[in-house]
Image (spheres, helix red, strand yellow):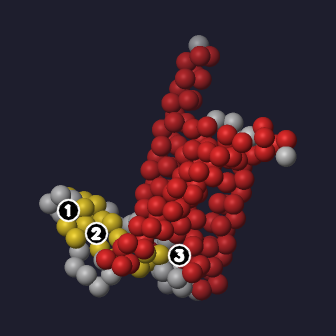
Amino acid sequence: MKLFLKRKTHIGVALGLFFANYVLDRVTKYIASVYLKDSEPVRLLKDTILLLYAENTGAFLSLGTHWNIYIKYFVLLIIPLIICIIGLLYVMLKEIKLYRIAIISCIIGGGIGNLVDRLCNEFKVIDFINFGIGRLRTGILNAADLSVTFGAILLMIYETIIKKEKDQNKM
């Protein structure tokens, strides 16, 4: 109980952002499945953004789509789930810096969103967003992918800035 009271802000930030990212992912996937499945793509901003329904049975850019089901469960579900649980516990109970807690919680919230799809939808993750200009386009992705990707980029940027500040203070 003392640990909880001592870290209630950290726990609140972690759980709040985790659930915000998770719920955003679930809601957008539900909307995509209702409004985009079996429909023509929705084109926005002169085709810069395409909204189209897809199901991915692999991981990033369909990696692992044709793997044996046991390997898929282990590599694409069990290991990431363990990492997410340990990561969430770490940010709630050990991490000191709120920016790291916030960013890592967003990454984990997105990760869990895709893991729930894999677990409950025969390994099919719902994707529905494609960005690009002309022939230069991303793969089809979802809100969870955006949480993970932008969270990882933001974490790298912050860590680089913090390292530079520490290096400058040493001089």
Secondary structure beneath label 3: helix
Using the rendered image of the protein, determine whether residue 141 is visible from the camera's viewpoint. yes
In the rendered image, the residue lying farthest to the left is: 46
Marker disc for residue 57: none
Indicate the position of residue 113 as horizontal and vertical percent values: 53, 67
Q: Do the residues labelled 2 and 1 touch (CB within 8 Å)?
A: yes
Indicate the position of residue 23 as horizontal and vertical percent values: 51, 62
Q: Quadrant of the C terminus?
A: top right
The residue wearing badge 1 is 44
In the rendered image, the residue lying farthest to the top is: 171
Please state which of residues 28 and 75 is positioned toward the viewer in this rendering.
28
Q: Do the residues labelled 2 and 3 touch (CB within 8 Å)?
A: no
Indicate the position of residue 105 as horizontal and vertical percent values: 59, 51
The amino acid on which the numbered mark 1 sits, given as a three-letter code, is Leu
Q: Which residue is drawn at 25% across and 67% down?
A: 50
Marker disc for residue 117: 3
Label 2 and label 3: CA atoms lie apart by: 19 Å
